[in-house]
Image: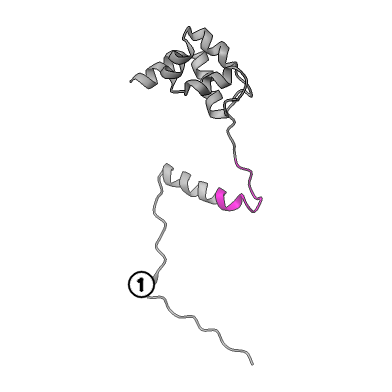
Amino acid sequence: MKTKRTSAKRSSSSKKPSRAKTTPLGESIVHGFEEAVAWPKGEVELRTRVIWVPDEVDVHAIRAKSGLSQSQFAERYGFNPRTLQDWEQGRRKPDSAVRAYLTVIDRNPSAIDNALRN
């Protein structure tokens, strides 16, 4: 036996609201959510940004270039002096964040000085 489908009338209060005009920020957020839903399904490939961090840094050379002693270098840039000694003597290796920090110290020490002093 077939049943007849009846449609109920919607009251004016249950009407789906019309989509308001969106801002560029709103559109960007919606697009981001759409990508986040589509990515696990393999429907989109997300953009990635690669920041190059050297695999190894010569901590001793960076410190020597600065003209600072181990204790001065450690104090100025926030390192534990013992850890700095371990890096320089090859007993330990700095992690990627520290390698990035040391690279900036080597290439642009005034930027670090300005950031830490101001």
Q: Residue furthest right?
A: 42
Q: Is residue 88 left or right of residue 67?
A: right
Q: Is residue 19 left or right of residue 96?
A: left
Which quadrant holds residue 45?
A: top right
Q: Is 57 in front, or is 26?
A: 57
Q: How is the image coloured?
A: one colour
Residue type, label 1: Ser
Q: Which span is picked out in magenta? A: 35-46
Q: Pinpoint residue 74: horizontal percent, then vertical percent.
A: 46, 18
- The reply to whether the magenta stretch includes residue 36 is yes
Which residue is at a point 51% across and 46% down the rendered structure image? 32
- The reply to whether the magenta stretch includes residue 19 is no
Q: Pinpoint residue 46: horizontal percent, then vertical percent.
A: 60, 42
Q: Is 91 in front, or is 29?
A: 91
Which residue is at a point 64% across and 24% down the rendered structure image? 55
Q: Residue furthest left?
A: 118
Q: What is the quadrant of the C terminus in the image? A: top left
Dot 1 falls on a residue whose secondary structure is helix
Which residue position is annotated with label 1? Answer: 12
Seen in the picture, residue 62 relative to 24 is either above or below; the reply is above
Q: Residue furthest front?
A: 82
